[in-house]
Image (cartoon, grey):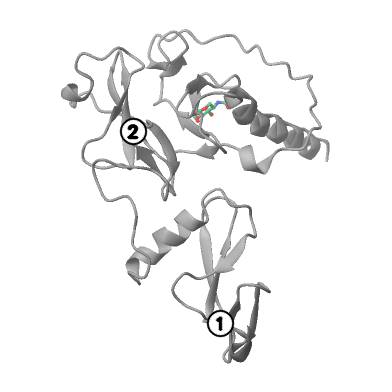
Amino acid sequence: MKLLVVLLALGGIVGLHGFKICDRMAPGTIMGSPTNCSEFYMCRNGRPVLFACPENMYFDVDTSACGYEAFCADNDVDFEQDPYEPPVPEYRPIEANPSQLVPTQTSVCRGAAPGAVRTDTTGCSAFYQCTKAGPLRLECPAGTLFDSNRLVCDAADIVSCAYAPPKPSIGGGGTGSGNLLEILCFGKKNGYKFAHPTNCARYVVCNGRNKAQEFTCPTGTAYNKQRKICDFTHNVEC
Ligand SMILES: *[C@@H]1O[C@H](CO)[C@@H](O)[C@H](O)[C@H]1NC(C)=O
């Protein structure tokens, strides 16, 4: 029981950090994590994105990039501050996939200083961070893409991408639908419910981690957007 309380309190602190660290920071700002030397945040409007450096690399506050001989700032976080403040789900960081050094992609960071951010000209799902050890490929988390103008991972439906069509078309059906639903669930709370974009008899519930689950209303009913329930079809405008 005691352990649970401690874990909950820690969860709250960690949850708040991404938020406080990015408070008043411009979208795209890279900030080292005060609680883990190998992690860093990318600030955006809303939940920041949490990235991890590859194994044996640490976030270097001098270059704002991952490095092997990195100077990791002392943990100067005041853990005494409001440990019981509840976590703010809207600002809990979104975790990105593991990053990967791609030393062979030499041209990506040619002439760039460590810490520089470079776009991936083959698509908008990832970007590069230039490090002393070579380009580091970082993938934006599910539901986000890299905005090639603003240089930030952001909700896929609002980014501008110079290298690939970023927006899946609604009504494309079948294969594209899952991805679209994830995009619609991006940043939404656990339990957030909405009408399926292409099928009246279905609705979608978000799980709070940018994932979507589809449900089908019972026969003779369809999803009523206003009442947020499965309703008799004659009550539903389809
Ligand atoms: C720090 O972050 C890395 C990468 O996410 C993780 O593997 C490691 O366990 C973390 N260390 C601590 C002490 O939490």
Q: Is residue 42 visible?
A: yes
Binning the other alpha carbons within 10 Å of mark 1 as few (below 14), some (14 to 19) or many (20 upward) gives few
Disc 2 crowd rating (10 Å Cα; few below 14, some 14-19, many 20+) is few
- Foreground pick, 173 / 132: 173
Q: Identify the residue at horizontal 19%, vertical 27% (top origin).
A: 105
Image mark for residue 237: 1
Q: Earlier in the sequence, mark 1 or mark 2?
A: 2
Distance from label 1 to label 2 (Cα)?
Answer: 40 Å
Q: Amino acid at mark 2?
A: Asn
Position of 37 with respect to 118 (left or right) is right
Q: Point out residue 57 in the picture as x, y percentages from the top left corner.
A: 41, 19
In front of the other: 98 or 167: 167
Judge left or right: residue 140 versus residue 196. Answer: left
Q: Which residue is mark 2?
A: 149
**Percent coordinates x, y for residue 163 in the rendering:** 23, 42
Q: Quadrant of the N terminus?
A: top right
Residue at horizontal 54%, vertical 36%? 45
Residue 101 is marked as none
Q: Position of residue 141 (x, y in %)?
A: 44, 42
How many numbered badges does the structure rendering display? 2
| Residue 59 locus on image (x, y percent) | 45, 17
Location of residue 181 with respect to 6 vertically, above or below: below
Is the residue under label 2 in contact with that under label 1 (CB below 8 Å)?
Answer: no
Residue 38 shows up from this direction: no
What is the secondary structure assignment of the residue under circle 2? loop
Q: Amino acid at mark 1?
A: Glu
Instruction: Spot the residue most to the front.
Output: 237
